[in-house]
Image (tube, rainbow, N blue to C red):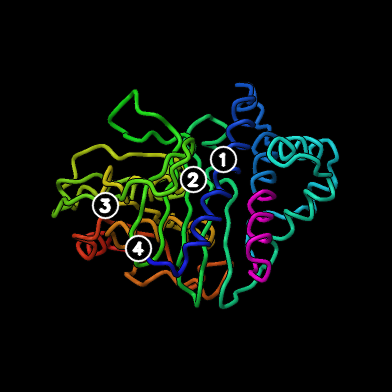
Amino acid sequence: MSTSYDREREVALHAVRKAATLCQAVQSQIDPSVIEKEDRTPVTVADFGSQALICNALREAFPDDPIIAEEDSSALRKNQGVLLQVTQQVQQIRSGVTPNTVCSWIDKGNAGEYSDRFWTLDPIDGTKGFVRGDQYAIALALVVDGVPQVAALACPNLPADLDDDDAPTGQAFIAVRGDGAYQVSLNGEDDSGTRIHTSDAETPANGRFTDSFVSAHSAHDMAKETGQRLGITADPIRMDSQAKYAIVARGDAEIYFRLPRPGTNYTEKIWDHAAGMLVVEMAGGTVTDVNGDPLDFTHAPLLTENTGIVATNGHFHDQVLDALEMD
């Protein structure tokens, strides 16, 4: 393994592990009625707590690195009850912290603009999955000169094997550009992990695709029609968060679609894709937008130069793009 980013890899993995511990603790306390009431308090607590822990870990290790993260503490400071809950959760990991300290850690993620070297973080990707008790991810990536170089993608509810009902859950996916991608248990002490590869399916008809669980996040009908044109007969794997990138990277699916819904002008955020993209690429796959263009991280925090996302196992990417028939 290259030594270029060894320290960054180590810090990133340990940071997402700590954040995953906090998120799992909060998720285990969610009452089913939360779903019916659309109470965002649990995910709010986990979002802010996760960001606080990771931003602090990064600043302690790399004090000069800007961080572009999803949250800031302004709303939290106005709700002392939720701030207290966030502080109590963070104290389970870092004892003795105060509410003001927690807010200052969260705001270390407010860099907001592109620089030659920065970290980008989504403290909880897959809000609805988190509340339902399903898939979500903690996504952290280091971007250098506009290119993701290190990724730590924690998926606390993802089993080690989708086909094994008894497989342990809680996986992290670690990638360093040029050094491959690895699956590491979130609950273990081994930092090296097992190297993963995309599937060896050479035609899309033999594969499966995955897209968002929630139709508001991706055009399900367009994905289905594209799958039919490619001859795919298997049912799609639908799940929340960048866990979709992870299952493409380790060969559970061959294609991940995030297709813009007709009539919308949504622009993707960098923190929703930087970590997952690198994991797939270092596992042997290919990631572009729907036009075949590489993802452009030089306009942070938005992917303003890109439309939609297509990730594949790398064997038939152009064929998938041709089948999309985007207007």
- Tell me the amino acid under the disc marked 4: Asp
The answer to whether marks 3 and 4 mark residues whose Cβ atoms lie closer than 8 Å is no
Highlighted magenta segment, given as a residue range:
51-66
Q: Dot 2 lies on which element?
A: strand
Q: Residues within 10 Å of mark 4 (few under 14, many from 20)?
A: some
Q: Nearer the viewer, residue 17 or 38?
A: 17
Cα distance in 3D space between marks 1 and 2: 7 Å
Q: Which residue is mark 2?
A: 154
Q: Which residue is mark 1?
A: 20
Which numbered mark, 3 or 4, is in the foreground of this view? Answer: 4
Left or right position of 204 against 181: left
Residue located 50% across and 40% down the image: 136
Q: Is residue 34 above or below residue 319?
A: above
Q: Dot 3 lies on which element?
A: loop
- Tell me the amino acid under the disc marked 2: Ala
The answer to whether marks 1 and 3 mark residues whose Cβ atoms lie closer than 8 Å is no
Counting residues from the start of the chain, the first of labels 3 and 4 encountered is: 4
Q: Which residue is mark 4?
A: 179
Q: Which residue is mark 3?
A: 197
- Tell me the amino acid under the disc marked 3: His
Residue located 57% across and 53% down the image: 122
x%, y% of residue 276?
43, 55
Counting residues from the start of the chain, the first of labels 3 and 2 encountered is: 2
Q: Is residue 242 above or below residue 62?
A: above
In magenta stretch: residue 139? no
Which numbered mark, 4 or 2, is in the foreground of this view? Answer: 4
The answer to whether marks 1 and 2 mark residues whose Cβ atoms lie closer than 8 Å is yes
Cα distance in 3D space between marks 3 and 4: 12 Å
Counting residues from the start of the chain, the first of labels 1 and 4 encountered is: 1
Cα distance in 3D space between marks 4 and 2: 19 Å
Cα distance in 3D space between marks 1 and 3: 24 Å
